[in-house]
Image (cartoon, rainbow, N blue to C red):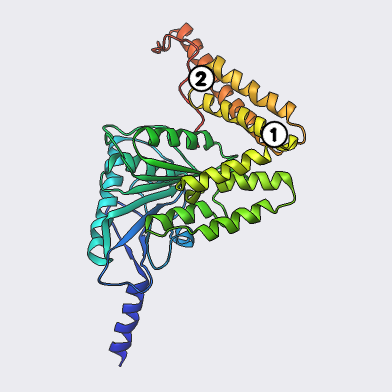
Amino acid sequence: MLVLLFLFMTAIAQAEGFSLEVKGVEDEILVVLPKNLNEERRYPAVFFYHGTNGRPNTSYLRTFASATDWIVVGMGYAQRGPFQLTPEGMAEEIRVLRTVREELIKRARLDPKRIFVSGFSKGGWLSGLLLQQEPSLAGAIILGAGHQYEVPNPQKRLDGKPVFIGVGRQDGNYPFGLRAVLYYRQRGAKPILETWHDLGHNLPSGEAMGLREWLALQVGEKPEEKDFIKELTAISERRNEFERWWELLAFEERPSVQGNPEWKKRVGELRAEWARSPTIAREERILAESQRLLIREISKKTLPGLKEIVEGHLRIVENAQGSPQGEIARHDAQRTGKILNLALQEFEQEERQQKEGEVRPKRDQNRNRFRKPLVR
């Protein structure tokens, strides 16, 4: 009976999940299996990479990924500590990814054609790089990060691959999140951005409906018209104009809305209707100016251009008295001001070293060009 009890408990543990040890990885990799695992089907998996100084975990993604449809994997790194992009480091992380993939194909009914990488902060940066390089991946979830670097010899195209980008509006990485949307769109992928308006460099502690919807869409769940109407009606009934408008902007970003042209049109029409109010019309103008500055920021590479962007954010702060966006602009001015100060320090240091004959840096034709943006 003791032997039978041991086998029974082992079977339960195996059904719920297990851990893996992979050569070259300090931490054990955690695997949570779908409930009621069916031996007759294959399951998609989402591999989650934690932030710097974290540990492998599955709890955050399990909150949003259906417990009956997904394998959730808490990944460890071959290279712990702060993020560094090197060919050797990428090769090691891909080796670990492939090792775990092969083990889960054998032990966990993994569908090798539906593997998604995800991560927060360092893990978000790595997820994007892995998607660029590893052709077996179906898509990526980039949280608290975005796009800055391209791996050597990336895949030529990422046609049709879904990419979810979630980042706090007050996160220093927010512009890189916007850049990721542009980059993956140009590569043929299907990126979608969820902005967490009240957050800095953190994950939402409550509901992230966009992430939940995105994961559901990957396993074939279809949003229903009645749910769309119910939520849109609830937003419309908000009494506070600011709250109602901000909620509509967040709703407009949702995967279910972005993926349905008719729903997207209806939300856009409602937004235009509300903009007839002088208060909301002012918010729309401030938002448009802020977005123009952000687009300039992710494309500008010169000190004079960055100075203009900082001054633009400060003008918004001055002119947006009484507007919630005034505080967001204040944060943008502080963030871009830090980048500008670092760039000026770098420029002055190189000028000083050049005069002293210590180094002879190769400069671009534009002597005011800077190269080291502030990256978390």
**Could you tell me which residue is drawn at 59 percent across and 41 percent down?**
269
Q: Residue furthest right?
A: 322
Q: Amino acid at mark 1?
A: Ala
Residue 184 appears anywhere in the view: yes
In-image side of 221 versus 112 (left or right): right
**Could you tell me which residue is drawn at 56 percent across and 46 percent down?**
266
Residue 142 versus residue 266: which sits nearer the camera? Answer: 266
Query: Disc 2 on helix, strand or loop?
Result: helix
What residue would you read off at disc 1?
281
Where, by quadrant of the figure, is residue 74 drawn? bottom left
Task: Find out whether the residues at labels 1 and 2 contact each other: C-beta distance under 8 Å.
Answer: no
**Could you tell me which residue is drawn at 63 percent across and 48 percent down?**
247
1 or 2: tag closer to the N-terminus: 1
Residue 64 versus residue 225: which sits nearer the camera? Answer: 225
Say how many tags the image has.
2
In-image side of 240 versus 208 (left or right): right
Please determine whether, in this image, residue 224 is positioned above or below residue 339: below
Mark linked to residue 231: none
Query: Disc 1 on helix, strand or loop?
Result: helix
Q: Amino acid at mark 2?
A: Glu
Distance from Cα at disc 1 to Cα at disc 2: 41 Å
The x and y percentages for residue 77 are 36, 49
The x and y percentages for residue 342 are 55, 24
Please determine whether, in this image, residue 200 is positioned above or below residue 318: below
- Label 1 or label 2, whichever lies nearer to me, is 1
What residue would you read off at disc 2?
346
Residue 258 appears anywhere in the view: no
In-image side of 153 versus 165 (left or right): left
Residue 75 versus residue 195: which sits nearer the camera? Answer: 195
